Amino acid sequence: MADIEITIDSANDLSIIKVHGELTLDEIIQTASKLYIQQPTRLVLWDLTEGTHKNISVVEFRGLAQKMRLLTGQRKAGKTAFVGSTDVDYGFFRMYEAFAELENIEVKYKTFKDIAAAKRWLGVRD
């Protein structure tokens, strides 16, 4: 179970989701449901530099993309950056990008190994 810290940067229309510990599939779905339906922002940054989702299977990740297609309708033209500092997390995020494309999710996704690069892609300044 992870500790999830959510920060809303209204000036940049950005939600930052900072994960500490081991993230579960249910936690991803609950967090995304809360943010994408109740407080949608155009930009989202999932920061797992102090966390991991390594125990989520490939099959679960594929199913996650199918669920996210239903939740991202409020974020058309949105962008989501994933930051994973381990090779496993980075690889899974890259795989999720492909699953999201197969599901025709209108949000753009990109995976990074550092926060600064992710923020540049999102067009956000510190």
Image (cartoon, helix red, strand yellow):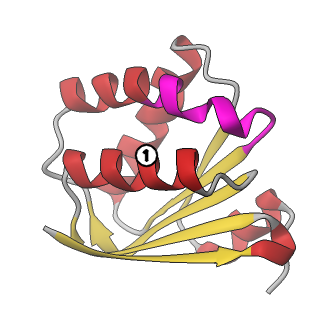
In magenta segment, residue 77: yes
- Where is residue 82 drawn, in percent x and y? 53, 56
In magenta segment, residue 102: no
**7 with respect to 90 (left or right):** right
Residue that appears at 22% across and 45% down: 25
- Where is residue 11 drawn, in percent x and y? 85, 76
Q: Which residues are magenta?
A: 68-78
**110 with respect to 55 (left or right):** right
Query: How many numbered circles are shown?
Result: 1
Residue that appears at 59% across and 62% down: 45
- Where is residue 4 drawn, in percent x and y? 34, 74
Query: Magenta residues: mostly which secondary structure?
Result: helix
In this view of the protein, which residue sits in the foreground, 113 or 106? Answer: 106
- Where is residue 72 drawn, in percent x and y? 59, 34
Measured along the vertical axis of the image, is residue 113 above or below residue 5? above
Q: Quadrant of residue 27?
A: bottom left
**Secondary structure of the residue carrying numbered label 1:** helix
**What is the three-letter code of the residue carrying label 1?**
Ser
Label 1: few (<14), some (14–19) or many (≥20) C-alpha neighbours in 10 Å: some
Q: Quadrant of residue 41?
A: bottom right
Q: Quadrant of the N terminus?
A: bottom left
Task: Give the labeled residue for mark 1.
Answer: 33
Measured along the vertical axis of the image, is residue 51 above or below residue 107? below
Measured along the vertical axis of the image, is residue 36 above or below residue 122? above
Q: Quadrant of residue 125?
A: bottom right
Q: Quadrant of the C terminus?
A: bottom right
Residue that appears at 43% across and 46% down: 33
Residue that appears at 78% across and 59% down: 122
**110 with respect to 46 (left or right):** right
Residue most toward the front?
Answer: 38
